[in-house]
Amino acid sequence: MKRHLNRFTTINPTNKNLKLIRQRLNKQSLRNPSHIPPHPLTIANLFNRFSVFIVCCSLACFSVFPVLAVEFDLSIDAKYGSYEWPNKSLPITGHASVVFQAKGANDLHIAIANSEDDGATLYEVVIGGWGNTQSVIRRSRAGANEAITNNTDAMLDNGWATYWVTLSNGRIAYGKGSEPGHNEKLSWQDPTPHNGLKWIGFSTWNAPIQYRDIEIASFITASHGAYTWVDETLPGFGQGAIIFQAQGTNDVHVTIADQQTDGANAYEIVIGGWGNTQSVIRRSQGGPNEAITNDTDAMLDSGWGTYWVTVENGRVAYGKGAEAGINEKLSWQDPTPQPDLQWVGFSTWNVPVSYQSISIFLAIEARYGAYQWTHRALPKIGQGTVIFEAQGSNDVHVAIAENENSTTNLYEIVIGGWGNTQSVIRRSRGGAIEAVTNNSDAMLDSGWGTYWVTAKNGRVSYGKGNEPGVNEKLSWQDPSPHATPQWIGFSTWNTPINFRNTKTVLAIEPSYTSYQWGNWRLSQAGQGSVVFQAKGSNDIHVAFADNEHDTANLYEIVIGGWNNSKSVIRRYRAGAYEASTYDNSAMIEDGWASYWAMISNGRISFGKGNVPGQNEQLSWQDPAPHTGIKWIGFSTWDAQVLYADIQPSDYYFNPEPHISGQWSAVYDWPIIPIHTLLLPDERLMTFGTNTVGTQGGHLVYDLAEYDASSPTPFIHDTSLNPSGSDLFCSAQILSSKTGKALIFGGDDGYDESNNGNDKTVLFDPSNDSMSQGPTMPLRRWYPTAITLPDGKVLIQGGVDTFVGGGTPTAIKTPEIYDPVGNSLSSLLNANSDYAYGKYANANTLGNRWWYPRSWAISSGQVFGISANAMYMLDTDGYGAIEEKGYFSANNVGASSTAVMFQPDKILQFGGGDTQNDGFSNTPGSTHATVFDLSSGSPEITETGSLTLGRHWATSTLLANGTVLATGGSEYNVQLNRGQGAARHAELWNPDTGQWQTMSPETHARLYHSTAILLPDGRVLSGGGGAPGPVNNLNVQIFSPPYLFDQAGLATRPSLLLTNISYTYGDPISFDVGSSDTISRVTLIKSGAVTHSFNSEQRFYELAFNKTNNTITGTLPSSSSILTPGYYLLFVINDQGTPSVGRLITLD
């Protein structure tokens, strides 16, 4: 039987590596601090002296951890802001915790920067400046003060004081004491945080300062499971070990994912969660617990704890200590292992946690040449380089193979074989030696060595260092090259070897714009993007071309050209540049950076990061675009550039706001807005979780006032829920008969049986009171509520209970709530397994009780779609159901979304499963369908497809009648996968039936996210979580393209309305600005949204006349077209720009 830890070596006293460690410890006299030789007292050796280090054995690996502080004195003379940079970077980029002691009269200066240079991008914290009278935070060295505090006791001239400085997600803070986050003195949140910060600098101004006991770690604030990613990946996909130290009271969160994205395919390990009482392993971020252990000592509140996490072929484990596999605390074997896991992220929940000494590696035991395949491939078939670090006494074996099972069709490179005396190249595993070199120093027995192995058109070579082609040790040209070598494997012979920092790259030598053309293509000519990583001193060249030759018609993007001083866009190879920007930080010579390039109808752009459209650096619109552009090529000029992780995609859009809209900053929200309503006074009511983002709708709800003109546009009033009802996954609606918000059903909120509840809750916004209404005859969890033409409320679907997680008891009888009489009645003759059951028959599975999608239509009936079943409901008397057959397309199920975009016309898109309670791998649908009910029966037509497949998106009607799709993901996150989060919004035009890609949102909006139209024509998008895979206690605001022109924000027409209450058939009259040219008048019903369905939205375009500046029209006479309720009234000018909406009542 295969052992779980067959490559994660359990250490014992006879293990060779442990003996080796002891020898080294004795040689270096590290067991006794007094044996440390003296060092000159300079900043360069600061971190060689401030701690004693021991070398720990873990997975046959040597990891370094500080274990005993040694005092030193570092004196910095008056420097006037010129920094000293210790040779120690942050473990997690962009997250810093610096704890230190200092002594001096004034002016402690601390910098957190993207390079070890005074001209770097940085934050600067000055403590006790200006003669020890003020402390400030700045966004650049000696720049403007962003935050300031007056304090005359910041520094102690005659003694040592302890300080901390932290950075997390753009929030910079400093305080006194040794506990980051405690006794805070000053902080500032950067609205546009710097990127790539990882270096710490120390300085002063006009007085000498002494520093000592400096401790550098990465600090993560309470983030409720939102992850921060380290730069290093696992050496092999889905296999490796992570050893790290952490400090905090509870909630170390570690994830191993396939993307650096919240919501990605991932495993999540929570150590010391729930107040340091439990640790768990999950199959997704925020997903169900697959394994759990009770331990109250997982974390050490008063000091650093050392932990390890391992993953190997779906087996996930964690333990304590610096030896992976030893002192295991919890493990779980995934029966269907997650694919392609490589990225490592850290997070916490409701408290800050600091991390340091993060080490990521792969350990391979003596294998006698049997390969461990990393599931990594060369960027281009037959051409590329693998760069890696290795540690051991001898026998690093590297294979580049045609497939991951090959023994003959591969190249094998043995480094330091035969007792570290020879290195060889072979044409097959264990085959004849084609090239050999004698070298006794190929491997470093006492530490890590860095190596590269390259294959290019049959020429195989290896060398030392991290620059392919430099310091070459051995090469061989195969006269008949293997056809498709690409897959990378590692092995050893008779000794264990550790591997880390593995990266497969395409190394392009100085080529003066001669391009490499791989299998990188766009699926649609002239539309798409490519994301990649690059490393070098200057001259990234990317081409979009119409063929795979340098003579092609192409667009050329040069990033960091002219010695990394300028970036340009050209219309031909090496031609005149059409757009340029000066930027001396475009490339990072000593590290990898992510970039994207995009083409969209002749608009060429590039930016930094891995989300196309975000952080754009340069763009140009070709007035006469090339045609047939599909191929992507890479090159350089006079310096080697390394390329990695090249990923073409169909993402494309024009990020100019008048074309693709614009997202605001991210704003905190006190809860996850699982349910969102727009109240009659234009406040937003949200509920569904508690204030830490877990299920808790019985605890609190929030009311938010919105002021678009404010930099902090929301004022929150979070109140206790006095109703006794858990509002989690209930139904919500707003009644114009009473002006109250009505909430039906939800969870019982008391145990793990997942029962529905039978309560109705009434919220009166006139006095902010909440009370219980009548008790429903049946308990409903996940029901739908809609307004009927007579103003009564139809309640459908829901489930009573999941007994022991088994088959739910579906509620198959709809009922009516009368808001005037505050009473309920059942539609007993409309009881229907077809419309509301779990299973209709063996061939038509589906949770039809789950938030049935339904609308009152002009015939007076209700049309519904439950999973794939269509029906008509007559609500007269005791009701009746008429079955309308099955919908056969794949944009179905609970995870789809639908909206009535015109009277009797419904758009449905996304989803993909009729059944949402299984672990389905069905991708989110890109399909979209229009249902026309004007004849009384559904007439189904197909409309344009989305770019992105979406489970759990939300559809929102905009002021002009277009439909905005936000959120969702490629795979069903209710099933806790979250793969392929759809961050880009998409906009559907009912006139053309086509979708247009909009700007990307910052956070993934997955299951339990909502979106709603605001009175000013913008859209609030927020939440997601409880369960995850990510918990987002935040929102963003989307400004649609209609709010912009090419110069910026467009001038909006004005709307002057005095009467806000109307009945059916009433005339309506109001004034607009004297210079406003009005082309449209629209009405959109105020929103009530949850679980991807806004049950109240509907759109109506009003015919009107304009005399001078007065608009007159007549409201529809039928309440079946516009059901009673609250409507946002907009006027739209001849440029397509809407006014701010006014809320009116129609009853």
Image: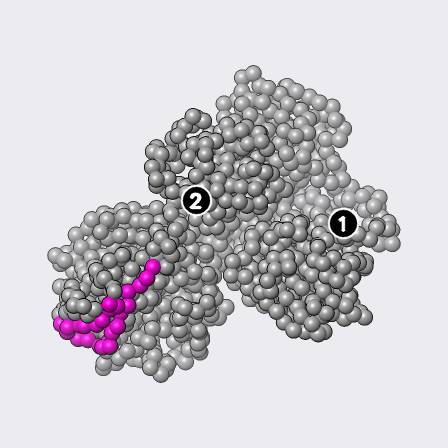
Residue 884 seen by the camera: no
Q: Where does the image place residue 19, in percent across and percent down from the top left?
A: 78, 43
- Give the residue drawn at x 86%, y 51%: 38
**944 to the left or right of 321:** left
Residue 1064 belongs to the span the image colors magenta: yes
Which residue lies under the disc numbered 1?
44
Q: Is residue 495 above or below residue 938?
A: above
Most foreground residue, 984 or 234: 984
Q: Quadrant of the N terminus?
A: top right
State yes or no: discs 2 and 1 in contact (Cβ < 8 Å). Answer: no
- Give the residue drawn at x 48%, y 42%: 580
Quarter of the image for residue 368 reads top right
Q: Quadrant of the C terminus?
A: bottom left
Q: Where does the image place residue 342, in percent across and percent down from the top left?
A: 54, 45
Amino acid type, label 2 = Ser
For numbered disc 1, what is the local secondary structure?
Answer: helix
- Give the residue drawn at x 72%, y 69%: 131
Q: Residue furthest top?
A: 479
Please tell me whether mark 2 or mark 1 is closer to you in this view: 2
**1046 to the left or right of 140:** left
Range of residues picked out in magenta = 1050-1074
Q: Where does the image place residue 767, in percent across and percent down from the top left?
A: 35, 83
Residue 626 belongs to the span the image colors magenta: no
Residue 619 numbered tag: 2
Most foreground residue, 668 or 498: 668
- Give the residue drawn at x 30%, y 49%: 995
Amino acid type, label 1 = Ala
Q: How is the image coloured?
A: one colour
Quarter of the image for residue 640 reads top right
Residue 639 seen by the camera: yes
Specify few, some or many for label 2: CA neighbours under 10 Å numbering under 14, 14-19, or 20 or more.
many
**60 to the left or right of 782:** right
